[in-house]
Image (tube, coloured by chain):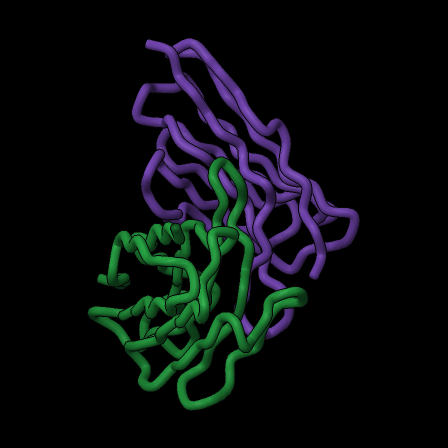
Amino acid sequence: GAVVSQHPSRVICKSGTSVKIECRSLDFQATTMFWYRQFPKKSLMLMATSNEGSKATYEQGVEKDKFLINHASLTLSTLTVTSAHPEDSSFYICSASGGAGLALDEQYFGPGTRLTVT
Amino acid sequence: GQQVMQIPQYQHVQEGEDFTTYCNSSTTLSNIQWYKQRPGGHPVFLIQLVKSGEVKKQKRLTFQFGEAKKNSSLHITATQTTDVGTYFCGHGSGNTGKLIFGQGTTLQVKP
């Protein structure tokens, strides 16, 4: 139980285009989803916290107009990287928490999406 | 949010040797969580500690939360090649459930 999927797993796009990444909780309804960014051999940097039906809360230094987050349902959150540039290339990971019967603080991570902007 | 410092950044051990990673904070933490990320994979939850002085064991892994709730450690006894990966500590910040992660310790095990 508590499986989180991400799609796509890998994407290559041209500079200036937008990319949408989906995060789904497959077997539970997540009250909260989180988006992280991870550079090679670095830690996970929290980008934003997303609750279903409300605006995402962005961490300091993260541009909300650059990284659009939509949390339309209890099982789906999307991250859109708008007008992507090479410096946006990274590993983006989502996590979900708060499902019924699950520990409140425990986060379940998706497999990640590797974005390469050329 | 409160920063947690994790040391060492890298550790290379011979299979069978022990390994410890430490997580330190300048302020009191409400809880500490540990995750493992295999190379090319995603973080997987290992455990959560909430009580002062708490010690929990999972087979060869021993997790400790300091008496002052400012530090934590993960100790692996007799490492195996399957232990390879990066171990992150993280703590809950605020009431949103968000986690702030340490820098991680990458463990390499030589067979």
* Place of residue B3 in the rendered image (x, y in percent of width and height, measured from the top left): 70, 51
B17 over B20 or under it: above or below: above
Q: Nearer the viewer, residue A14 or A29?
A: A14
* Place of residue A115 in the rendered image (x, y in percent of width and height, measured from the top left): 37, 53
Quadrant of the rendering where the N terminus of chain B is positioned: bottom right
A118 over A21 or under it: above or below: above
Chain whose colour in the figure is purple? B
* Place of residue B99 in the rendered image (x, y in percent of width and height, measured from the top left): 55, 60
Relative to B25, B46 lies left or right: left
Q: Nearer the viewer, residue B111 or A5?
A: A5
Quadrant of the rendering where the C terminus of chain B is positioned: top left
A55 over B55 or under it: above or below: below
Relative to B36, A21 lies left or right: left
Q: Quadrant of residue A20?
A: bottom left
Give the color of chain A as drawn.
green
* Place of residue A81 in the rendered image (x, y in percent of width and height, measured from the top left): 43, 67
